[in-house]
Image (cartoon, rainbow, N blue to C red):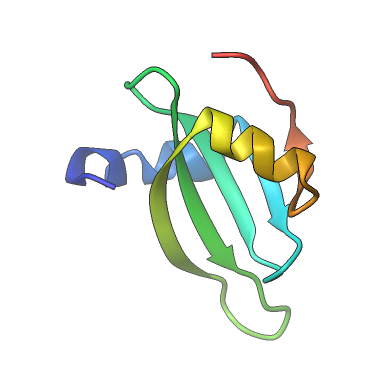
């Protein structure tokens, strides 16, 4: 992610378009639309009950790729819904 995209971190966390569960790693992925058509900004959280949660990754991903991963069963939608861009 670019610096200006990292500045969107409070928005990504407080008002995501999607919250996904990565079924392989157990990480929560918060997703919002970016200023670029067809691209989403995603932030991955390492969730642990007994410890503080930590952001472990931030990345740009094509909306199409996210949709394919959800259909393939690797991500589960926890909150929000898929929308066409």
Which residue: 22% across, 44% down? 2
Between residues 34 and 75, which one lies in front from this camera angle? 75
The percent coordinates of residue 44 (x first, y second) are 52, 59
Q: Residue furthest top?
A: 85
Quarter holding residue 27: bottom right
Position of 85 relative to 47 (above/below): above
Which residue: 67% across, 45% down? 69
Between residues 76 and 15, which one lies in front from this camera angle? 76
Is 48 placed left or right of 45 in the picture?
right
The percent coordinates of residue 85 (x first, y second) are 54, 14
Is 45 placed left or right of 21 in the picture?
left
Is 31 placed left or right of 57 in the picture?
right
Which residue: 19% across, 46% down? 3
Position of 12 relative to 50 (above/below): above
User: Can residue 19 be seen from the camera position used here?
Assistant: yes
The percent coordinates of residue 68 (x first, y second) are 67, 37
Position of 1 relative to 49 (above/below): above
Quarter holding residue 50: bottom right
Which residue: 72% across, 55% down? 21
User: Can residue 15 be seen from the camera position used here?
Assistant: no
Q: Residue furthest left?
A: 3
The percent coordinates of residue 84 (x first, y second) are 62, 14
Position of 26 relative to 77 (above/below): below
């Amino acid at each position: 992610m670019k610096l200006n995209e990292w500045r969107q971190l409070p928005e990504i966390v407080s008002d995501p378009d999607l919250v996904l569960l990565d079924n392989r790693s157990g990480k929560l992925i918060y997703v919002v639309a970016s200023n670029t058509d067809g691209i989403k900004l995603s932030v991955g959280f390492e969730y642990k009950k007994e410890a503080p949660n930590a952001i472990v990754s931030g990345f740009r991903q094509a909306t199409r790729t996210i949709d394919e991963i959800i259909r393939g069963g690797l991500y589960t939608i926890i909150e929000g819904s898929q929308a066409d861009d």
